[in-house]
Image (tube, coloured by chain):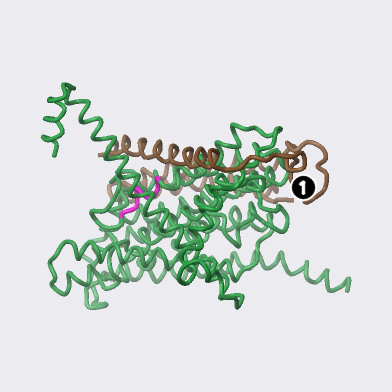
Chain colours: A green, B brown
Amino acid sequence: MENIISNLFKMIGLPTEVAYILAFFAAAGLLFFVLSLVGQVAVVFMVLMERKILAWITQRKGPNRVGPWGLLQTVADGVKLLFKEDIMMPHQDKLLFTLAPVLFFAPTFVIYALIPFTDQLLGINLGLGLLFVFALSSLGVVGMVLAGWGSNNKYSLLGGMRSASQAISYEIPLVLSALAVALAAGSLNIREIVETQNAGGFGLFSWYAISLLPLTFVIFWISSIAEVNRIPFDLPEAESELVSGYNTEYSGMKFALFFLAEYASLFGMSALMAVLFFGGYYSPFGGLITQNLGIDIPVVHQLEMATWIITKTYIFIALAMLIRGTLPRLKPDQLMGFSWKFLIPLSLVNLFMVAILKMAWLQENIPTIPLFGREISVCYLGTYAALFLLLIATLAGFGSIFKRKVVPHIQLQQRTV
Amino acid sequence: MYTQGFGVLLILFLCSIIFALSTILISWIVNPKAPNPLKNTPYESGMNPFGEAHIKFDVKFYLYALLFILFDIEAMFLFPWAASFVNLGLLGLFEMFIFIAILFLGLVYAWRRKALDWQ
């Protein structure tokens, strides 16, 4: 392939270096095309899924007119938004107002390039992949704040400020819990994290959601829901108080970009959860089913890997949607307090628990006992059990702190009645 | 190994920005434009807008931002520690424990001074 290109360029009379640079750009462009296609299809499906799930929860039918089971509803909505008037007011900051949705949208699709959908189907294999995913996911805040400031609207400004404070508060527990995974895997490369967590050979039980303390996953899950601004953490878009938050003044395609980016980041976060805590592209029975059955066709393996990770991702997306249909919204003080007074101390404690667990895992020449058909070190099991009990005690302690604050308030209300 | 792939990532980012801008451009070409004075007023739930839209924010936002910078830099220091934890051994664990304990004291101080209370 390289020879063909270089020969072609020699015939035209251009230096071969230009050919390589052009080929590089073409490859990157193709990668973006594939990723955005995957992303758009995923988002179109997710929007319909959310509307259907919310409809079923409230005993409605949901979209069912456009296409079979309403499958084309989202496409129709997208086309409609493309042809809608883009309302721009004379006193708005036109540059910021246009730039905000672009800045909000751009990083969400780049995250897809860093998520390994199979061991081969990976956009870019970065050595610092995990760090870079968080760098990209926090860039979206800039777009939200700019949207709030550029709209020249009080609701938008408040929504933008709230989203910024929320995003920075929940980013710390998110990063600290992902750090625990990086610590256990000993790498920041996302594919290596997947490979190491399946190298244990216990299948389901060697996934980091279980083999590390389950708390790591719970912290990550809660903060990731807050990071993508979904109920119960959707203060930036609280429709009962801020109309629609930072995108109140947006219409047409700019609104569609915000909408698209929100779902795309939900997909990205869910995929990241599947990769970091649930074995990525491997099956819950250890390795791959087709490999265990003795089918040695690479294409079949790749297909199975893609199926596993997509299934896991969509389970988390569906859970986020169920939570949206079930839970009420928090108050701003509860939201900030929950992160700074509960999740951040807890995630620091959790990081040290995982470090101690990793220490126990590294100890050699320790007697082993058979568990799930394999030998497992007594040291690791003992530390795991001890830390688990300690964890429950810590949570009970935290719980008692918060309970004491709530009780007098209720008594006060009863007295006035 | 740690610097590979960033060029592709940069181009991906540019592609993403160009894609977003081009959808806005296409929409700008095909959409109708019919402004009127009422449409051009900021939305305030049907009331006539009053006062400045660029109001002053609460100073609480800045406090959270300061605390965030502190803890984000801490997380940056923790990343290399986590990646090379196996090589550092027990000494690394204790050193990081002291480092985090000092920062944790800062959080407790902020908590006691009611910097973390929203009201």
Q: Residue at position x 33%, y 66% from top?
A: A207
Task: Give the answer, above or below, for where A248 lies relative to A375.
Answer: above
Task: Give the answer, above or below, for where A7 lies relative to B105.
Answer: above
In the image, residue A358 lies at what x, y percent? Answer: 33, 58
In front: A11, or B89?
A11
Residue at numbered disc 1: B44
Direction from residue B32 to residue A331 in the image, left or right: right
The quadrant the N terminus of chain A occupies is top left
Regarding residue A307, the answer to whether it shows in the image is yes
What kind of element bears circle 1? Answer: loop
In the image, residue A285 lies at what x, y percent? Answer: 26, 73
* Total numbered labels placed on residues in the image: 1
In front: A255, or A143?
A255
The quadrant the C terminus of chain A occupies is bottom right
Q: Residue at position x 52%, y 61% from top?
A: A222
Q: Tell me the crowding category of disc 1: few under 14, some 14 to 19, or many 20 or more residues within 10 angstroms, Cα based.
A: some
In the image, residue B61 lies at what x, y percent? Answer: 66, 42
Residue interval drawn in magenta: A110-116
Residue A392 covered by magenta stretch: no
Chain of residue at mark 1 = B
Regarding residue B58, the answer to whether it shows in the image is no
In the image, residue A57 lies at what x, y percent? Answer: 58, 75
Direction from residue A397 to residue A130 in the image, left or right: left
